[in-house]
Image (cartoon, rainbow, N blue to C red):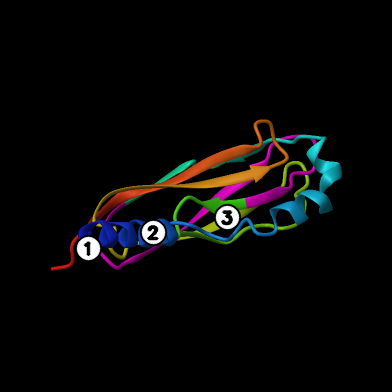
Amino acid sequence: MNKLFFGAIISLTIASSCTTNSGANLEERKQEYAQYVDEPSEITFEETEYNFGTVVDGDMVKHTFKFTNSGDKELVLLDVKSTCGCTVPEDWPKQPIAPGEGGEIKVIFNSNNKVGAVNKGIRVEANTNPSVTTVSIIGTVKAAE
């Protein structure tokens, strides 16, 4: 019984550590920029995957994903979030981006207790078709010596 209880506690701890509240304002942003949702634009990233190589457990990895509004309508990022709390979209444009203009999404990955191969996705929801584009941070975390 104790093993079952202990296993349940660990599962809940892991699940709660891999969630993020970055989408809390998604519905508000969808309402605020509703006129843009019906007029899709296009987003083009300079890179959709960043390989940070090998880092030591506990290191912080920072990367900036650069993109361009490659469509002919205003581009609005409605939400940017990761699938795990260890990868946080630190900053991203909140205002509409004109055609031909660009922006940046700054991401921080905390490698603490993530030893092994890493592949973390960041979902970018915008007034594009499809509405979600995913960029990734990959690499390897080795144990501290």
Kindly state the secondary structure of the residue where label 3 is placed.
strand
Marks 2/3: CA distance? 30 Å
Three-letter amino acid code of the residue under disc 3: Ile
Three-letter amino acid code of the residue under disc 1: Asn
Q: Quadrant of residue 57?
A: bottom left
Res. 40 in view: yes
> Horizontal placement of 110 versus 66: left or right?
left
Query: Which of label 1 and label 2 is nearer to you?
Result: 1
On the rendered image, what quadrant is the C terminus found in? bottom left
Indicate which disc, 2 or 3, sits on the residue closer to the N terminus.
Answer: 2
Q: Are marks 1 and 3 in contact (CB under 8 Å)?
A: no
Q: Are marks 1 and 2 in contact (CB under 8 Å)?
A: no
Mark 3: give few (<14), some (14-19) or many (20+) Cα within 10 Å. some
Kindly state the secondary structure of the residue where label 2 is placed.
helix
Kindly state the secondary structure of the residue where label 1 is placed.
helix
Range of residues picked out in magenta:
53-79
Three-letter amino acid code of the residue under disc 2: Leu
Q: Position of residue 45 (x, y in %)?
A: 57, 41
Marks 1/2: CA distance? 15 Å
Q: How many numbered marks have been drawn onto this rendered protein structure?
A: 3
Q: Tell me, for residue 105, which label it has, or none.
A: 3
Indicate which disc, 1 or 3, sits on the residue closer to the N terminus.
Answer: 1
> Horizontal placement of 76 versus 124: left or right?
right
